[in-house]
Structures are given as C-alpha cells and as structure tokens.
Image (tube, rainbow, N blue to C red):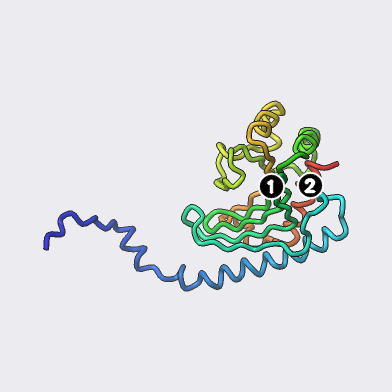
Amino acid sequence: MDNSTDPIWSQNELKLINEVDVFLHKPTIMKNVETRLLQLKESLAAHLAENSRSYPPGTDLVKGQIVRGENHKGFPFLSLDIPQNFSKTEFFTYRTLFWWGHYLAFSLLLKGPRIPDYLKCLLKNRQQPGGEGIFVARNTSPWEWEWTEENYSSVHQIPEEEIQTVVNGIGYIKLVRFFSLAEPSFPSLDWAATGVQTYRELIALVMD
C-alpha cells in the first residue's frame, strides 16, 4: 500500500497526541469553574435584590442561566447570564464568560430602545474612576468574544465621536472587563466579589 500521500506528523503533533493530562483534569477544572459561577450567581442575586434601579423592568434576577460548550472557536467555555432580559426588541444581560485558554470576562450587553440613554451616560461617565480596564465592543456581532483591537477599544482611550459612530453603527453596547488566565494574580481572583464589583462599575457607566 502506497502511503506517500499521507500527511506528515510534525514533532509537536506527535507530542500532543501522547498528552493525556488535559483530558484527565478537564472534568475537575470545569466543575471548579461551574462552582465559582454558582457562587457568583448567588452574590449577584443578593446584590440585585437590594439595588432595584440597576436593571430595567422584566429582568430575570434569580434564575440566571449557566451554559457549557465545547467548541467556541475550538475551545471549551462556561457562561453565566444574570441578570438577564432577552426579548425581540431588547437585550439587558450581564454575562460572565470563562473561555478555556483565554480569559474570564465580565460583560454588560445592552440593546433596544434605551440605547440612546445608555450611550449618553457612557459618554458622560467613561472617564470616571472605575472605567480603567473596561472595553467597549466594536464588532458588528454582539457574540464576538475574541479580545483584539479590531473587536474592542478601551472606554478611556477611544474618542467620544468614535464611540458614538461605533454604537450607532452596530446598534448595541457591550462593555467588558477581561482577566487573562495567564496573569499571575488569576489563581487568587475572587470571582464572586469581582463579578459583583464589575457589575456595579459597568452599570455606573450607563445609568445615572
């Protein structure tokens, strides 16, 4: 049998197909992530119960939703949506995303008739303390999570006119704070406390 047309194994490929650790530990890692998201869910629900002005009417404050996937651009992920309000005319959700090999992200996604009011507040509040390290999405899809300059800009650094143009063009606002999994400080990150604090910071940017 002629195998001359078979693809050639690279040394890296041969090494990787003999690696088993990631598969052995993956279930425990994902369970760890899920536990942290459940703790965050409880903390957010408690915060929301005491802060009724930080979300529009009809928003789910208790149920939340945890989604697990195996292939977002080739990598597993877990996400939590709370508070959340998805309808045909409006989005208002706070999404926490753990994306394997990339980062942990806390994001506020807004779409609908309140966008002009949210944008007005964002332009006014974006330079206030708490806005450091927060990014605004600029991709036409609100579901693009690749953290690149093409997809996200710092709310502190992007010019006011550019924010207006971007938001008016894409029709939604998504504000995100990223925590790289490679950062030395990541293992000690308190997801629940940081998630609640980030929610407060993002809401302060778009609501008075």
Res 63 label: none
The amino acid type, in three-letter code, at marker 1 is: Lys
Please tell me whether mark 2 sits on a helix, a strand or a loop: helix
Point 68% across, 34% down: residue: 167
Picture coordinates of residue 125, whole percent (x, y) = 80, 37
Please identify the quarter of the rendering in which residue 95 is found. bottom right
Residue 103 left/right relative to 38: left
**Which mark's residue is nearer the viewer, 1 or 2?**
1
Picture coordinates of residue 135, whole percent (x, y) = 66, 42
The amino acid type, in three-letter code, at marker 2 is: Ile
Q: Nearer the viewer, residue 130 or 69?
A: 69
Q: Residues within 10 Å of mark 1 (few under 14, many from 20)?
A: few
Picture coordinates of residue 199, whole percent (x, y) = 76, 52
The residue where tag 1 is placed is 88
Picture coordinates of residue 205, whole percent (x, y) = 78, 41
Point 63% across, 40% down: residue: 137
Q: How crowded is mark 2: few (under 14 residues within 10 Å), some or many (20 or more)?
A: many
Res 203 label: 2
The reply to whether the C-beta atoms of the residues labelled 1 and 2 are less than 8 Å apart is: no
Figure quadrant of the C terminus:
top right
